[in-house]
Protein backbone atom coordinates (compact mmCIF):
# COMPACT_ATOMS: atom_id res chain seq x y z
CA UNK A 1 0.00 0.00 0.00
CA UNK A 2 1.52 3.32 -1.04
CA UNK A 3 1.37 6.39 1.16
CA UNK A 4 -0.92 8.12 -1.32
CA UNK A 5 -3.40 5.27 -1.10
CA UNK A 6 -3.73 5.60 2.65
CA UNK A 7 -3.46 9.39 2.89
CA UNK A 8 -5.63 10.29 -0.09
CA UNK A 9 -8.00 7.33 -0.30
CA UNK A 10 -10.70 9.11 -2.32
CA UNK A 11 -8.46 10.45 -5.08
CA UNK A 12 -5.65 7.89 -5.19
CA UNK A 13 -6.96 6.49 -8.47
CA UNK A 14 -7.32 9.82 -10.25
CA UNK A 15 -5.26 10.03 -13.41
CA UNK A 16 -3.57 13.22 -14.61
CA UNK A 17 -5.46 13.05 -17.94
CA UNK A 18 -8.84 12.93 -16.16
CA UNK A 19 -9.92 9.63 -17.73
CA UNK A 20 -12.17 7.22 -15.87
CA UNK A 21 -11.04 4.00 -14.28
CA UNK A 22 -12.76 0.96 -15.75
CA UNK A 23 -13.62 -2.10 -13.68
CA UNK A 24 -10.39 -3.94 -14.50
CA UNK A 25 -8.19 -1.01 -13.48
CA UNK A 26 -10.30 -0.49 -10.38
CA UNK A 27 -9.85 -4.14 -9.40
CA UNK A 28 -6.10 -3.92 -9.95
CA UNK A 29 -6.05 -0.92 -7.62
CA UNK A 30 -7.69 -3.03 -4.90
CA UNK A 31 -11.25 -2.15 -5.79
CA UNK A 32 -14.21 -4.26 -4.64
CA UNK A 33 -12.02 -5.79 -1.89
CA UNK A 34 -14.14 -4.03 0.74
CA UNK A 35 -17.30 -5.45 -0.82
CA UNK A 36 -15.83 -8.97 -0.73
CA UNK A 37 -14.86 -8.47 2.89
CA UNK A 38 -18.41 -7.41 3.78
CA UNK A 39 -20.36 -9.96 1.75
CA UNK A 40 -18.04 -12.96 1.89
CA UNK A 41 -16.25 -12.26 5.17
CA UNK A 42 -19.35 -12.68 7.28
CA UNK A 43 -19.98 -9.06 8.26
CA UNK A 44 -23.54 -8.29 9.31
CA UNK A 45 -25.37 -5.10 8.29
CA UNK A 46 -25.18 -4.01 11.93
CA UNK A 47 -21.42 -4.57 11.96
CA UNK A 48 -21.04 -2.25 8.94
CA UNK A 49 -23.21 0.41 10.60
CA UNK A 50 -21.20 0.12 13.83
CA UNK A 51 -17.94 0.49 11.95
CA UNK A 52 -19.14 3.59 10.10
CA UNK A 53 -20.38 5.07 13.39
CA UNK A 54 -17.06 4.32 15.03
CA UNK A 55 -15.28 5.97 12.10
CA UNK A 56 -17.28 9.14 12.88
CA UNK A 57 -18.18 9.56 9.21
CA UNK A 58 -20.33 12.67 8.73
CA UNK A 59 -22.25 13.66 5.62
CA UNK A 60 -20.17 15.46 2.98
CA UNK A 61 -23.14 17.12 1.27
CA UNK A 62 -22.96 20.10 3.61
CA UNK A 63 -25.02 19.36 6.68
CA UNK A 64 -22.57 16.94 8.31
CA UNK A 65 -25.12 14.55 9.80
CA UNK A 66 -23.49 11.40 11.25
CA UNK A 67 -23.86 8.76 8.52
CA UNK A 68 -24.05 5.66 10.74
CA UNK A 69 -26.71 7.29 12.88
CA UNK A 70 -28.79 8.11 9.79
CA UNK A 71 -28.51 4.48 8.69
CA UNK A 72 -29.62 3.22 12.09
CA UNK A 73 -32.98 5.04 11.78
CA UNK A 74 -34.11 2.58 9.08
CA UNK A 75 -36.69 0.15 10.49
CA UNK A 76 -35.51 -3.45 10.39
CA UNK A 77 -36.84 -6.90 11.07
CA UNK A 78 -39.62 -9.04 9.68
CA UNK A 79 -42.37 -6.42 10.06
CA UNK A 80 -40.35 -3.57 8.55
CA UNK A 81 -41.83 -2.00 5.43
CA UNK A 82 -40.23 -2.92 2.14
CA UNK A 83 -38.59 -2.23 -0.19
CA UNK A 84 -35.91 -0.08 1.41
CA UNK A 85 -34.20 2.47 -0.82
CA UNK A 86 -30.72 3.95 -0.90
CA UNK A 87 -30.27 7.17 -2.85
CA UNK A 88 -27.01 8.78 -3.77
CA UNK A 89 -27.51 12.53 -3.87
CA UNK A 90 -25.43 13.48 -6.90
CA UNK A 91 -27.37 16.66 -7.61
CA UNK A 92 -24.31 18.82 -7.06
CA UNK A 93 -25.63 22.33 -7.65
CA UNK A 94 -24.40 24.36 -4.70
CA UNK A 95 -22.73 27.36 -6.37
CA UNK A 96 -18.96 27.14 -6.08
CA UNK A 97 -19.00 23.36 -5.54
CA UNK A 98 -17.25 21.01 -7.94
CA UNK A 99 -16.16 18.00 -5.90
CA UNK A 100 -18.67 15.22 -6.62
CA UNK A 101 -18.28 15.69 -10.37
CA UNK A 102 -14.60 14.70 -10.06
CA UNK A 103 -15.40 11.59 -8.00
CA UNK A 104 -18.05 10.38 -10.46
CA UNK A 105 -16.17 11.20 -13.65
CA UNK A 106 -12.83 9.76 -12.66
CA UNK A 107 -13.57 6.87 -10.30
CA UNK A 108 -17.19 5.78 -10.80
CA UNK A 109 -16.61 2.30 -9.37
CA UNK A 110 -15.52 3.75 -6.02
CA UNK A 111 -18.99 5.29 -5.70
CA UNK A 112 -20.72 2.12 -6.86
CA UNK A 113 -18.79 -0.03 -4.37
CA UNK A 114 -19.62 2.47 -1.62
CA UNK A 115 -23.28 2.27 -2.56
CA UNK A 116 -23.43 -1.52 -2.54
CA UNK A 117 -21.82 -1.70 0.92
CA UNK A 118 -24.06 1.09 2.24
CA UNK A 119 -27.07 -0.60 0.65
CA UNK A 120 -26.12 -3.82 2.45
CA UNK A 121 -25.82 -1.94 5.76
CA UNK A 122 -29.37 -0.59 5.55
CA UNK A 123 -30.62 -3.75 3.80
CA UNK A 124 -31.68 -1.77 0.73
CA UNK A 125 -33.33 -3.53 -2.18
CA UNK A 126 -33.09 -0.73 -4.73
CA UNK A 127 -30.63 2.14 -5.11
CA UNK A 128 -30.77 5.24 -7.28
CA UNK A 129 -28.07 7.70 -8.20
CA UNK A 130 -29.87 11.03 -8.53
CA UNK A 131 -27.57 12.90 -10.92
CA UNK A 132 -28.03 16.46 -12.10
CA UNK A 133 -28.93 16.58 -15.77
CA UNK A 134 -26.03 18.82 -16.78
CA UNK A 135 -23.43 16.26 -15.66
CA UNK A 136 -23.41 14.50 -19.01
CA UNK A 137 -19.88 13.11 -18.83
CA UNK A 138 -20.50 11.74 -15.32
CA UNK A 139 -23.70 10.16 -16.59
CA UNK A 140 -21.91 8.39 -19.46
CA UNK A 141 -19.15 7.10 -17.21
CA UNK A 142 -21.50 6.00 -14.44
CA UNK A 143 -23.74 4.19 -16.91
CA UNK A 144 -20.78 2.29 -18.28
CA UNK A 145 -19.51 1.48 -14.78
CA UNK A 146 -22.94 0.28 -13.62
CA UNK A 147 -23.13 -2.05 -16.63
CA UNK A 148 -19.65 -3.37 -15.83
CA UNK A 149 -20.63 -3.91 -12.19
CA UNK A 150 -23.74 -5.87 -13.23
CA UNK A 151 -21.66 -7.99 -15.63
CA UNK A 152 -19.20 -8.80 -12.84
CA UNK A 153 -22.04 -9.72 -10.39
CA UNK A 154 -21.37 -6.81 -8.06
CA UNK A 155 -24.98 -5.76 -8.69
CA UNK A 156 -28.19 -7.68 -9.24
CA UNK A 157 -29.33 -10.90 -7.62
CA UNK A 158 -27.12 -12.67 -5.05
CA UNK A 159 -24.11 -10.42 -5.34
CA UNK A 160 -20.89 -12.46 -5.47
CA UNK A 161 -22.96 -15.52 -4.59
CA UNK A 162 -24.11 -14.03 -1.27
CA UNK A 163 -27.67 -13.65 -0.01
CA UNK A 164 -27.62 -9.94 -0.75
CA UNK A 165 -29.27 -8.49 -3.88
CA UNK A 166 -29.33 -4.88 -5.04
CA UNK A 167 -30.61 -3.13 -8.16
CA UNK A 168 -28.85 0.15 -8.96
CA UNK A 169 -30.33 2.73 -11.34
CA UNK A 170 -29.11 6.07 -12.60
CA UNK A 171 -31.67 8.88 -12.72
CA UNK A 172 -30.88 12.06 -14.65
CA UNK A 173 -32.57 15.10 -13.14
CA UNK A 174 -34.58 17.69 -15.02
CA UNK A 175 -32.78 20.50 -13.18
CA UNK A 176 -33.39 22.90 -10.24
CA UNK A 177 -31.36 23.38 -7.05
CA UNK A 178 -34.33 22.16 -4.97
CA UNK A 179 -33.65 18.59 -6.14
CA UNK A 180 -30.56 18.53 -3.94
CA UNK A 181 -32.73 19.07 -0.85
CA UNK A 182 -33.44 15.52 0.26
CA UNK A 183 -37.23 15.64 0.41
CA UNK A 184 -37.37 17.72 -2.79
CA UNK A 185 -35.24 14.98 -4.33
CA UNK A 186 -37.74 12.33 -3.24
CA UNK A 187 -40.58 14.23 -4.91
CA UNK A 188 -38.51 14.68 -8.08
CA UNK A 189 -37.77 10.97 -8.21
CA UNK A 190 -41.49 10.27 -7.86
CA UNK A 191 -42.14 12.43 -10.95
CA UNK A 192 -43.47 15.44 -9.07
CA UNK A 193 -42.39 19.05 -8.55
CA UNK A 194 -39.40 19.15 -6.22
CA UNK A 195 -41.17 20.87 -3.33
CA UNK A 196 -39.93 19.94 0.15
CA UNK A 197 -41.87 17.64 2.46
CA UNK A 198 -42.78 18.23 6.06
CA UNK A 199 -40.44 16.51 8.52
CA UNK A 200 -41.05 14.36 10.57
CA UNK A 201 -41.51 11.74 9.33
CA UNK A 202 -37.89 11.68 8.17
CA UNK A 203 -36.91 9.82 5.00
CA UNK A 204 -35.23 6.84 6.74
CA UNK A 205 -38.71 5.97 8.04
CA UNK A 206 -41.02 7.38 5.35
CA UNK A 207 -39.14 8.27 2.18
CA UNK A 208 -39.30 7.40 -1.50
CA UNK A 209 -42.78 6.10 -2.44
CA UNK A 210 -43.49 6.14 1.31
CA UNK A 211 -40.80 3.53 2.05
CA UNK A 212 -37.67 3.73 4.24
CA UNK A 213 -35.01 5.67 2.34
CA UNK A 214 -31.49 6.76 3.11
CA UNK A 215 -30.06 9.64 1.11
CA UNK A 216 -26.28 10.11 1.18
CA UNK A 217 -23.95 12.44 -0.70
CA UNK A 218 -21.48 11.11 -3.32
CA UNK A 219 -18.35 11.89 -1.29
CA UNK A 220 -19.85 10.33 1.84
CA UNK A 221 -20.57 7.05 0.04
CA UNK A 222 -17.08 7.06 -1.50
CA UNK A 223 -15.55 7.04 2.01
CA UNK A 224 -17.31 3.79 2.97
CA UNK A 225 -15.12 1.18 1.16
CA UNK A 226 -11.99 2.73 2.66
CA UNK A 227 -13.42 2.57 6.18
CA UNK A 228 -14.13 -1.14 5.63
CA UNK A 229 -10.65 -1.77 4.20
CA UNK A 230 -8.57 0.13 6.75
CA UNK A 231 -10.80 0.37 9.81
CA UNK A 232 -12.47 3.03 11.87
CA UNK A 233 -9.35 3.97 13.83
CA UNK A 234 -7.40 4.61 10.65
CA UNK A 235 -10.22 6.78 9.27
CA UNK A 236 -10.44 8.85 12.45
CA UNK A 237 -6.67 9.38 12.40
CA UNK A 238 -6.85 10.86 8.87
CA UNK A 239 -8.43 14.02 10.27
CA UNK A 240 -6.30 16.63 12.02
CA UNK A 241 -9.04 17.55 14.48
CA UNK A 242 -11.74 15.48 16.12
CA UNK A 243 -13.65 15.26 12.81
CA UNK A 244 -12.61 12.17 10.90
CA UNK A 245 -11.35 11.39 7.43
CA UNK A 246 -10.09 13.33 4.49
CA UNK A 247 -12.18 15.92 2.67
CA UNK A 248 -12.18 17.28 -0.84
CA UNK A 249 -11.44 20.97 -0.43
CA UNK A 250 -11.54 23.45 -3.28
CA UNK A 251 -10.97 27.08 -4.08
CA UNK A 252 -12.34 29.28 -6.85
CA UNK A 253 -12.19 33.00 -7.54
CA UNK A 254 -9.08 35.10 -8.21
CA UNK A 255 -6.55 32.80 -6.57
CA UNK A 256 -3.37 31.75 -8.38
CA UNK A 257 -4.26 28.07 -8.69
CA UNK A 258 -7.98 27.39 -8.41
CA UNK A 259 -8.56 23.68 -7.87
CA UNK A 260 -9.59 20.75 -5.74
CA UNK A 261 -7.45 18.83 -3.23
CA UNK A 262 -8.04 15.87 -0.95
CA UNK A 263 -6.66 16.96 2.43
CA UNK A 264 -7.04 15.96 6.06
CA UNK A 265 -10.28 17.11 7.66
CA UNK A 266 -9.37 20.09 9.80
CA UNK A 267 -6.84 21.63 7.39
CA UNK A 268 -7.01 25.37 8.02
CA UNK A 269 -8.58 27.76 5.55
CA UNK A 270 -5.28 29.63 5.36
CA UNK A 271 -3.38 26.52 4.35
CA UNK A 272 -5.93 25.71 1.64
CA UNK A 273 -5.89 29.27 0.38
CA UNK A 274 -2.16 29.97 0.54
CA UNK A 275 -0.42 26.63 0.07
CA UNK A 276 -2.80 24.76 -2.19
CA UNK A 277 -4.50 27.57 -4.10
CA UNK A 278 -1.23 29.53 -4.20
CA UNK A 279 -2.64 32.66 -2.58
CA UNK A 280 -4.26 35.57 -4.35
CA UNK A 281 -3.32 36.61 -7.89
CA UNK A 282 -0.72 39.41 -7.95
CA UNK A 283 -3.13 42.16 -8.96
CA UNK A 284 -5.70 41.59 -6.20
CA UNK A 285 -5.87 41.28 -2.41
CA UNK A 286 -8.00 39.03 -0.26
CA UNK A 287 -11.22 40.35 1.29
CA UNK A 288 -13.17 37.29 2.39
CA UNK A 289 -14.48 33.91 1.39
CA UNK A 290 -17.51 31.68 1.50
CA UNK A 291 -15.98 28.52 2.98
CA UNK A 292 -18.24 25.84 1.56
CA UNK A 293 -20.56 27.00 -1.20
CA UNK A 294 -23.08 29.80 -1.61
CA UNK A 295 -25.10 29.00 1.50
CA UNK A 296 -22.35 29.51 4.07
CA UNK A 297 -21.45 32.67 6.01
CA UNK A 298 -18.59 34.90 4.79
CA UNK A 299 -15.31 34.51 6.64
CA UNK A 300 -12.67 37.26 6.77
CA UNK A 301 -8.90 37.37 7.43
CA UNK A 302 -9.15 37.14 11.23
CA UNK A 303 -10.64 33.64 11.04
CA UNK A 304 -8.46 32.10 8.32
CA UNK A 305 -6.52 29.97 10.80
CA UNK A 306 -9.69 28.08 11.70
CA UNK A 307 -9.57 24.38 10.82
CA UNK A 308 -12.06 23.38 8.12
CA UNK A 309 -14.20 20.87 9.94
CA UNK A 310 -17.81 20.74 11.06
CA UNK A 311 -17.23 21.85 14.65
CA UNK A 312 -14.58 24.56 14.33
CA UNK A 313 -16.34 26.29 11.45
CA UNK A 314 -19.63 26.47 13.31
CA UNK A 315 -17.82 27.97 16.32
CA UNK A 316 -16.82 31.01 14.23
CA UNK A 317 -20.40 31.43 13.02
CA UNK A 318 -20.02 29.84 9.61
CA UNK A 319 -20.16 26.29 8.23
CA UNK A 320 -17.81 24.00 6.37
CA UNK A 321 -20.66 23.28 3.96
CA UNK A 322 -19.33 21.44 0.92
CA UNK A 323 -15.73 22.47 1.66
CA UNK A 324 -15.25 24.30 -1.63
CA UNK A 325 -14.43 27.93 -0.93
CA UNK A 326 -15.34 30.92 -3.08
CA UNK A 327 -12.84 33.73 -2.65
CA UNK A 328 -13.73 37.43 -2.79
CA UNK A 329 -11.00 39.90 -3.78
CA UNK A 330 -10.75 43.69 -3.53
CA UNK A 331 -11.43 44.22 -7.25
CA UNK A 332 -14.82 42.50 -6.96
CA UNK A 333 -17.82 44.31 -5.46
CA UNK A 334 -19.15 42.57 -2.34
CA UNK A 335 -22.62 44.05 -2.94
CA UNK A 336 -22.57 42.74 -6.51
CA UNK A 337 -21.49 39.32 -5.25
CA UNK A 338 -24.29 39.28 -2.67
CA UNK A 339 -26.77 40.31 -5.38
CA UNK A 340 -25.54 37.44 -7.55
CA UNK A 341 -26.05 35.01 -4.65
CA UNK A 342 -29.54 36.34 -3.86
CA UNK A 343 -30.46 36.16 -7.54
CA UNK A 344 -29.55 32.48 -7.44
CA UNK A 345 -31.54 31.69 -4.31
CA UNK A 346 -34.58 33.74 -5.41
CA UNK A 347 -34.60 32.01 -8.79
CA UNK A 348 -34.25 28.55 -7.28
CA UNK A 349 -36.93 28.98 -4.61
CA UNK A 350 -39.62 26.41 -5.39
CA UNK A 351 -42.41 28.73 -4.25
CA UNK A 352 -43.65 26.54 -1.42
CA UNK A 353 -43.01 28.73 1.66
CA UNK A 354 -43.83 32.44 1.83
CA UNK A 355 -40.69 33.75 3.61
CA UNK A 356 -38.68 32.13 0.81
CA UNK A 357 -40.58 32.94 -2.40
CA UNK A 358 -41.52 36.41 -1.26
CA UNK A 359 -38.50 37.41 0.82
CA UNK A 360 -35.68 36.22 -1.44
CA UNK A 361 -37.04 38.12 -4.43
CA UNK A 362 -37.46 41.21 -2.29
CA UNK A 363 -33.87 41.06 -1.11
CA UNK A 364 -32.68 40.54 -4.66
CA UNK A 365 -34.55 43.61 -5.89
CA UNK A 366 -33.09 45.78 -3.10
CA UNK A 367 -29.56 44.65 -3.97
CA UNK A 368 -30.12 45.12 -7.69
CA UNK A 369 -31.30 48.68 -7.10
CA UNK A 370 -28.34 49.32 -4.81
CA UNK A 371 -25.93 48.19 -7.53
CA UNK A 372 -27.72 50.51 -9.99
CA UNK A 373 -27.21 53.50 -7.67
CA UNK A 374 -30.77 53.51 -6.38
CA UNK A 375 -30.11 52.31 -2.83
CA UNK A 376 -32.24 53.92 -0.13
CA UNK A 377 -31.46 54.71 3.50
CA UNK A 378 -33.13 51.93 5.45
CA UNK A 379 -32.30 49.26 2.85
CA UNK A 380 -29.77 47.61 5.13
CA UNK A 381 -32.30 47.33 7.94
CA UNK A 382 -34.77 45.77 5.50
CA UNK A 383 -32.16 43.25 4.37
CA UNK A 384 -31.20 42.40 7.95
CA UNK A 385 -34.86 41.94 8.82
CA UNK A 386 -35.41 39.72 5.77
CA UNK A 387 -32.46 37.48 6.57
CA UNK A 388 -33.93 36.93 10.04
CA UNK A 389 -37.33 36.05 8.55
CA UNK A 390 -35.87 33.20 6.53
CA UNK A 391 -35.29 30.88 9.43
CA UNK A 392 -34.18 28.30 10.38
CA UNK A 393 -37.60 27.06 11.33
CA UNK A 394 -39.60 29.49 9.19
CA UNK A 395 -39.67 27.30 6.09
CA UNK A 396 -39.95 23.61 5.21
CA UNK A 397 -36.40 23.26 3.91
CA UNK A 398 -32.93 24.77 4.24
CA UNK A 399 -32.93 26.87 1.05
CA UNK A 400 -33.99 30.15 2.68
CA UNK A 401 -31.90 29.68 5.84
CA UNK A 402 -29.00 28.91 3.51
CA UNK A 403 -29.60 32.15 1.61
CA UNK A 404 -29.62 34.07 4.89
CA UNK A 405 -26.08 32.97 5.71
CA UNK A 406 -24.17 34.90 3.00
CA UNK A 407 -26.56 37.86 3.25
CA UNK A 408 -26.37 38.39 7.00
CA UNK A 409 -22.61 37.89 7.05
CA UNK A 410 -22.02 40.18 4.04
CA UNK A 411 -23.97 42.90 5.82
CA UNK A 412 -21.63 42.53 8.81
CA UNK A 413 -18.30 41.93 7.05
CA UNK A 414 -18.72 44.51 4.27
CA UNK A 415 -21.06 47.04 5.91
CA UNK A 416 -18.98 50.04 4.77
CA UNK A 417 -19.27 48.92 1.16
CA UNK A 418 -23.04 48.61 1.38
CA UNK A 419 -23.31 52.03 3.02
CA UNK A 420 -21.03 53.57 0.40
CA UNK A 421 -23.30 52.28 -2.39
CA UNK A 422 -26.29 54.02 -0.79
CA UNK A 423 -24.44 57.22 0.12
CA UNK A 424 -22.71 57.70 -3.23
CA UNK A 425 -25.70 56.43 -5.22
CA UNK A 426 -23.44 54.25 -7.39
CA UNK A 427 -21.39 51.06 -7.33
CA UNK A 428 -17.79 52.18 -6.70
CA UNK A 429 -16.53 49.12 -8.62
CA UNK A 430 -18.24 50.07 -11.89
CA UNK B 1 -48.16 10.71 -31.51
CA UNK B 2 -45.21 9.28 -29.67
CA UNK B 3 -42.94 7.26 -31.92
CA UNK B 4 -42.37 3.56 -31.30
CA UNK B 5 -38.78 4.39 -30.39
CA UNK B 6 -39.86 6.98 -27.84
CA UNK B 7 -42.38 4.61 -26.27
CA UNK B 8 -39.76 1.88 -26.13
CA UNK B 9 -37.28 4.16 -24.35
CA UNK B 10 -39.95 5.39 -21.93
CA UNK B 11 -40.95 1.84 -21.05
CA UNK B 12 -37.32 0.83 -20.46
CA UNK B 13 -36.99 3.68 -17.95
CA UNK B 14 -40.41 3.01 -16.46
CA UNK B 15 -39.36 -0.48 -15.37
CA UNK B 16 -37.06 1.19 -12.83
CA UNK B 17 -39.91 2.76 -10.83
CA UNK B 18 -42.92 1.30 -9.02
CA UNK B 19 -45.36 3.97 -10.27
CA UNK B 20 -46.19 5.25 -13.77
CA UNK B 21 -45.89 8.91 -12.81
CA UNK B 22 -42.30 8.49 -11.58
CA UNK B 23 -41.04 8.15 -15.14
CA UNK B 24 -42.67 11.35 -16.39
CA UNK B 25 -39.52 13.51 -16.15
CA UNK B 26 -37.48 10.87 -17.99
CA UNK B 27 -40.29 10.59 -20.54
CA UNK B 28 -40.24 14.32 -21.25
CA UNK B 29 -36.45 14.28 -21.52
CA UNK B 30 -36.66 11.36 -23.98
CA UNK B 31 -39.18 13.17 -26.18
CA UNK B 32 -37.11 16.34 -25.97
CA UNK B 33 -34.01 14.45 -27.08
CA UNK B 34 -35.87 13.31 -30.20
CA UNK B 35 -37.76 16.54 -30.98
CA UNK B 36 -35.74 19.33 -29.37
CA UNK B 37 -38.54 20.45 -27.02
CA UNK B 38 -41.82 19.38 -25.43
CA UNK B 39 -44.76 20.82 -27.37
CA UNK B 40 -48.37 20.97 -26.12
CA UNK B 41 -49.08 18.01 -28.38
CA UNK B 42 -46.17 15.97 -26.98
CA UNK B 43 -47.27 16.87 -23.47
CA UNK B 44 -50.77 15.53 -24.18
CA UNK B 45 -49.34 12.35 -25.70
CA UNK B 46 -47.00 11.69 -22.77
CA UNK B 47 -49.76 12.40 -20.24
CA UNK B 48 -52.11 10.00 -21.99
CA UNK B 49 -49.41 7.34 -22.21
CA UNK B 50 -48.67 7.58 -18.48
CA UNK B 51 -52.26 7.98 -17.34
CA UNK B 52 -51.66 11.45 -15.94
CA UNK B 53 -53.68 14.61 -16.43
CA UNK B 54 -52.16 17.13 -18.84
CA UNK B 55 -52.27 19.79 -16.12
CA UNK B 56 -50.38 17.62 -13.66
CA UNK B 57 -47.72 16.84 -16.23
CA UNK B 58 -47.39 20.49 -17.27
CA UNK B 59 -46.96 21.52 -13.63
CA UNK B 60 -44.00 19.14 -13.51
CA UNK B 61 -42.69 20.19 -16.94
CA UNK B 62 -42.65 23.89 -16.05
CA UNK B 63 -40.85 23.26 -12.76
CA UNK B 64 -37.69 21.80 -14.31
CA UNK B 65 -35.38 24.11 -16.21
CA UNK B 66 -33.93 21.40 -18.46
CA UNK B 67 -37.34 20.63 -19.92
CA UNK B 68 -38.06 23.08 -22.73
CA UNK B 69 -41.71 24.00 -23.24
CA UNK B 70 -40.79 26.32 -26.11
CA UNK B 71 -38.84 25.52 -29.27
CA UNK B 72 -35.08 25.99 -29.09
CA UNK B 73 -32.40 26.33 -31.75
CA UNK B 74 -30.30 23.46 -33.11
CA UNK B 75 -27.81 24.06 -30.31
CA UNK B 76 -28.48 25.28 -26.79
CA UNK B 77 -25.87 27.37 -25.02
CA UNK B 78 -26.20 27.35 -21.24
CA UNK B 79 -23.91 29.95 -19.73
CA UNK B 80 -23.16 29.72 -16.00
CA UNK B 81 -24.24 32.83 -14.07
CA UNK B 82 -23.42 31.56 -10.57
CA UNK B 83 -21.02 33.18 -8.17
CA UNK B 84 -17.59 31.81 -9.15
CA UNK B 85 -18.20 32.42 -12.85
CA UNK B 86 -19.61 35.86 -11.99
CA UNK B 87 -16.37 36.76 -10.15
CA UNK B 88 -14.32 35.51 -13.11
CA UNK B 89 -16.14 37.55 -15.76
CA UNK B 90 -19.58 36.07 -16.50
CA UNK B 91 -21.07 39.49 -17.39
CA UNK B 92 -18.44 40.13 -20.07
CA UNK B 93 -18.74 36.61 -21.48
CA UNK B 94 -22.54 36.81 -21.67
CA UNK B 95 -22.30 40.21 -23.39
CA UNK B 96 -19.75 38.84 -25.83
CA UNK B 97 -21.78 35.75 -26.75
CA UNK B 98 -24.91 37.88 -27.00
CA UNK B 99 -23.26 40.43 -29.30
CA UNK B 100 -21.67 37.73 -31.44
CA UNK B 101 -25.02 36.02 -31.98
CA UNK B 102 -27.27 39.09 -31.81
CA UNK B 103 -29.46 37.62 -29.05
CA UNK B 104 -30.11 38.06 -25.34
CA UNK B 105 -30.70 35.40 -22.69
CA UNK B 106 -33.78 33.37 -23.51
CA UNK B 107 -33.63 34.11 -27.24
CA UNK B 108 -32.88 32.07 -30.37
CA UNK B 109 -30.91 33.30 -33.38
CA UNK B 110 -32.90 34.04 -36.55
CA UNK B 111 -31.20 31.18 -38.40
CA UNK B 112 -32.31 28.85 -35.55
CA UNK B 113 -28.71 27.86 -34.87
CA UNK B 114 -28.39 28.81 -31.19
CA UNK B 115 -30.56 29.41 -28.15
CA UNK B 116 -28.87 31.23 -25.26
CA UNK B 117 -29.92 30.38 -21.70
CA UNK B 118 -28.50 31.06 -18.24
CA UNK B 119 -27.68 28.09 -16.04
CA UNK B 120 -26.74 27.71 -12.39
CA UNK B 121 -23.29 26.53 -11.29
CA UNK B 122 -21.97 23.85 -13.66
CA UNK B 123 -19.44 22.54 -11.14
CA UNK B 124 -16.56 23.95 -13.13
CA UNK B 125 -15.63 26.73 -10.70
CA UNK B 126 -11.87 26.12 -10.85
CA UNK B 127 -12.01 26.75 -14.61
CA UNK B 128 -14.46 29.65 -14.62
CA UNK B 129 -16.09 31.16 -16.56
CA UNK B 130 -17.86 28.19 -18.08
CA UNK B 131 -20.72 27.28 -20.39
CA UNK B 132 -22.26 24.18 -21.90
CA UNK B 133 -23.14 23.85 -25.55
CA UNK B 134 -25.52 20.93 -25.94
CA UNK B 135 -23.85 18.11 -23.99
CA UNK B 136 -20.34 19.52 -23.81
CA UNK B 137 -18.77 21.66 -21.11
CA UNK B 138 -16.48 24.52 -22.18
CA UNK B 139 -14.35 26.18 -19.52
CA UNK B 140 -11.75 28.95 -19.00
CA UNK B 141 -13.75 31.09 -21.41
CA UNK B 142 -12.46 34.25 -23.05
CA UNK B 143 -13.65 35.92 -26.27
CA UNK B 144 -11.17 34.02 -28.48
CA UNK B 145 -12.13 30.71 -26.96
CA UNK B 146 -15.84 31.49 -27.36
CA UNK B 147 -15.23 32.20 -31.06
CA UNK B 148 -13.50 28.85 -31.48
CA UNK B 149 -16.20 26.97 -29.57
CA UNK B 150 -19.13 28.48 -31.49
CA UNK B 151 -17.54 27.56 -34.83
CA UNK B 152 -17.81 23.89 -33.88
CA UNK B 153 -21.61 24.02 -33.87
CA UNK B 154 -23.00 24.55 -37.40
Image (tube, coloured by chain):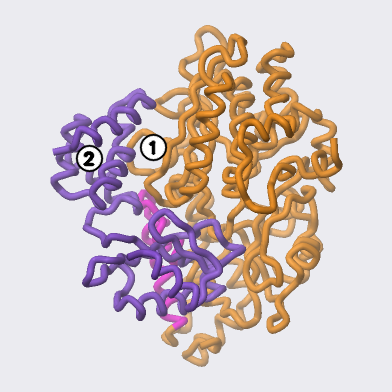
Chain colours: A orange, B purple
**Residue in the image at 53% along x and 23% along y:** A150
Q: Which mark is residue A187?
A: 1
Q: Please provide percent x and percent y for residue A392.
A: 53, 51
**Residue in the image at 20% along x and 37% along y:** B46
Q: In the picture, residue B53 is in which quadrant? A: top left
Q: Look at mark 2 in the image and give the residue it sits on.
A: B56
Q: Indicate whether B103 appears above or below A210.
A: below
Q: Chain of mark 1?
A: A
Q: Indicate whether A243 appears above or below A28.
A: below
Q: Please provide percent x and percent y for residue A13.
A: 71, 42
**Residue in the image at 77% along x and 51% along y:** A263
**Nearer to us in this view, B111 or A284:** B111
Q: Indicate whether B12 appears above or below B95.
A: above
Q: Indicate whether B42 appears above or below A406.
A: above
Q: Chain of mark 2?
A: B
> Dominant secondary structure of the magenta stretch?
helix
Which span is picked out in magenta?
A: A343-371
- Does residue A380 appear anywhere in the picture? no
Position of the N terminus of chain A by quadrant: top right
Is A367 part of what is drawn in magenta? yes
Q: Are marks 1 and 2 in contact (CB under 8 Å)?
A: no
Distance of mark 1 from mark 2, alpha carbons? 14 Å
**Nearer to us in this view, A234 or A304:** A234
**Residue in the image at 52% along x and 86% along y:** A421
Q: In the picture, residue A208 is in which quadrant? A: top left
Q: Secondary structure at mark 2?
A: helix
Q: Residues within 10 Å of mark 1 (few under 14, many from 20)?
A: many
Amino acid sequence: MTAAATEKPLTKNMRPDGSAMDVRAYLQAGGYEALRKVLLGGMTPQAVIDMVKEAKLRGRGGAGFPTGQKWSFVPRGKDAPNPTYLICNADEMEPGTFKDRLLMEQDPHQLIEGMIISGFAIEADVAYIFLRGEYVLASERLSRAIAEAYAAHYLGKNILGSEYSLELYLHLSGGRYMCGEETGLLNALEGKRANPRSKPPFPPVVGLFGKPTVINNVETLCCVPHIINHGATWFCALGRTHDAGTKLFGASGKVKRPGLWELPMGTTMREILEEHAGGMREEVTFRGLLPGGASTDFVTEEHLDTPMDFTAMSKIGSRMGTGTMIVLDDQTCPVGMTWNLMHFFAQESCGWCTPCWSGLGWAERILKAMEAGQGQPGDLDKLTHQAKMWGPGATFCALAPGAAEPLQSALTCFRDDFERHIREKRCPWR
Amino acid sequence: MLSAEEINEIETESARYPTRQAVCIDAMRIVQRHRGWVSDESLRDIAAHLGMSVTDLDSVATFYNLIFRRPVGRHVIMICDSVSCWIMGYDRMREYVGKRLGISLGETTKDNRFTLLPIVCLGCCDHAPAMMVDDTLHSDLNPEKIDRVLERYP
